[in-house]
Image (cartoon, coloured by chain):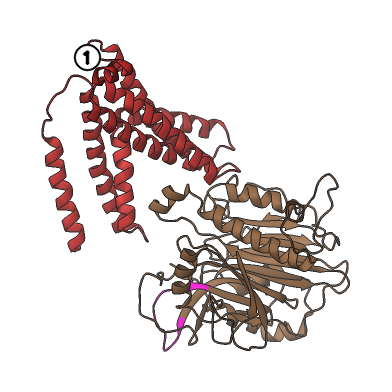
Amino acid sequence: MKHEEHLVPEGRACPARDAPGVAADLTASWFTPARGGDQKALAKWCATVGPAVIDSLPADRFGRWQPGDSLAVVTWNLHGGAGDFLEFIDVEMGLSCDERSAASEPHASNFVVLIQEAFRRSETVPSVPDGPTIPPPLKEKPRPGPRTDIVEVARHCGLSLFYVPSMRNGAEEYEGEREDRGNAILSTLPLTDFIAIEMPFEAQRRVAVAATVHNSERDSLRVVSLHLDVASSLLRLLTTGNSTRQRQGLAIADALLETELARAGVADSSYEARCYPYCGDAKTPRFHASTIVGGDFNTWSSNETVIKHFSREFPDSPPDDGQPTRGAYPTDYLFVRRGSDGSIDLLPGSFRRIENSYHSDHHARILWLK
Amino acid sequence: MRSPDAIRVTAALAAATLILAAKPAQAQEGSDLARVGGSALGLYSGAVLGTVGSLIPCSQTYAGARCVRGLGVLGGIVGLGAGFYLGDLDEDAVVDAYRGAGYGLLIGSAAGLILKQVVERYNWADVAASGLVGAAIGSSAKGAAIGLAAGSIIGAALYWAIPSFDLPNAVGVAVMGMALGGIGSWVVRGVEADDAGPTAQPVVFSYSLKL
């Protein structure tokens, strides 16, 4: 992966591929695949989407993450506007975004929600001719309530937000506005250290997003939201040996490794440096911060290669419960790696599938940390 | 309404079917051309079947794509050897294998055309790939069919008997059965040609004649 640290330019959505970005007020790190073929395809897709959105601070009414406080981490594929996010956080997280109750009721617990297939409707999404780099819109089943985009929802509820569009959500125009979709992180906590990881191109452009939340005393927790391709073309399937999700997943793992190595001040990429999270017999975590990766891995089974790799690289993950999250398939996962600072403890038995899908085609998964 | 491309491809498939239906000249023993042709088709068929058959089982391993590539190479090596042996013994059998590959190409391409109409992002390259996979299967159709049937029965049995053996695994066993049956049929045809007797010639002898 090629790592470019630069400012997120206002009004742009894509990493600089050959030139640094222009000035802006918030920084993000972009990882892009090193292969030229990937870059070329990704650049074409990227030209169709709007800019990333960073609202790093939540509303004042949310409390800090104090030692001993619990923190919920959720991963959920919203399926565009199908999933009812407002009802979801009301029922599951205890946060009502109704303005009167939001003003009067203290919020119970902090949370981080890792979202996939979030959509954003905006005039900042460029008007471009329809073509192969614009996928059709997601097929959403009608549901009660308004169809609000991820930026509206986050701002309405006062949540911090990091949203990076991966692709367009159809070519349609809605009174001068257009839609894109991608991964997002929403939280009641401030978000920092924004990272966007463009995955190797397989079938569609995909961008994983990462950010960090902090508690008031100890170190940080990096959270990552990803969505892997469901399938590549038949020709690619045969010529690459069905490596679609393996390639994308390992690219994300590599980018996270590089991030942690850089943060730890390790300049080399020797075996010793790369043998994270545990080296030799000492079983000592090499990296200071903890990481939770959640997302829609689009896997047929929980024994797939990419899941085996993530299970090894995130050894503190809760055991797989075997429950499907999309139809009969176990597509959605949460992986955990505790840092050496011991800043997180997984509450035993807290990892589960949320039974109500809230009109999405995916069930969410949740775990609780202390 | 069908696109002009689809009409042209359909017409080409129909013409190719007529050509394949013509009866070939008969040859009762091996030849240089049959050895080269058998080796090439065996290599191709074995490599493709090895790849296709290992896609799902290997996706359940840590090695993943490396496992697929390894089994594709192994299938190709077995196919190459068996194809050479078959061509050395029985030119007719090689011609039959090519005829089967032709039918497979047509059927695979036709299936690809149908998929292109119904599957999002299924493009012309995928239609061609469908045809090429069809050709690999068609060159050893009987063995592939037997293998698919056996694999389907075993996969279904395991699916019902073992709760953790999920549907993708069952499909994987069926497809792997097809691949093993197809690759195996190259070997079996070589053995059958060897058993057939008078027309078979040892490899060393056939080369010594040329010298």
Rendered shade, chain A: brown
Residue visible at 66% across and 66% down? A224
Instruction: Report which colour depicts chain B.
Output: red
Is residue A12 shown left or right of residue A343? left
Q: Quadrant of the C terminus of chain A?
A: bottom right
Left or right of residue A261, residue B134 in this image: left
- Which element is circle 1 on? loop
Regarding residue B186, the answer to whether it shows in the image is: yes
The dominant secondary structure in magenta is loop
Residue B64: horizontal and vertical position, in percent? 55, 45
Give how far across and how far down residue B30 sits, in percent: 23, 22
In front: A290, or A198? A198
Amino acid, disc 1: Thr
Asked if residue A13 is positioned above or below residue B197 in the image, the reply reads below
Say whether residue B185 is visible: no
The chain letter for the residue carrying disc 1 is: B
Whether residue B35 sits left or right of residue A112 in the image: it is left
From what the image shows, is residue B108 above or below residue A33? above
- The residue sitting at the front extreme is B211
Question: Along the line of sight, which residue is nearer the eye, A363 or A310?
Answer: A310
Task: In the rendered view, tell whether residue A224 sits above or below residue A172.
Answer: above
Label total for image = 1
Q: Which residue is mark 1?
A: B199
Q: Is residue A258 above or below residue B20?
A: below
Q: Position of residue A215 (x, y in %)?
A: 83, 72
Residue under the image location 86 percent in, 72 percent down: A66
Stretch of the chain drawn in magenta: A166-178
In the image, B170 versus B58, the foreground residue is B58
Which residue corresponds to the image point at 52% horizontal and 31% vertical from the top-left?
B158
Q: Quadrant of residue A127?
A: bottom left
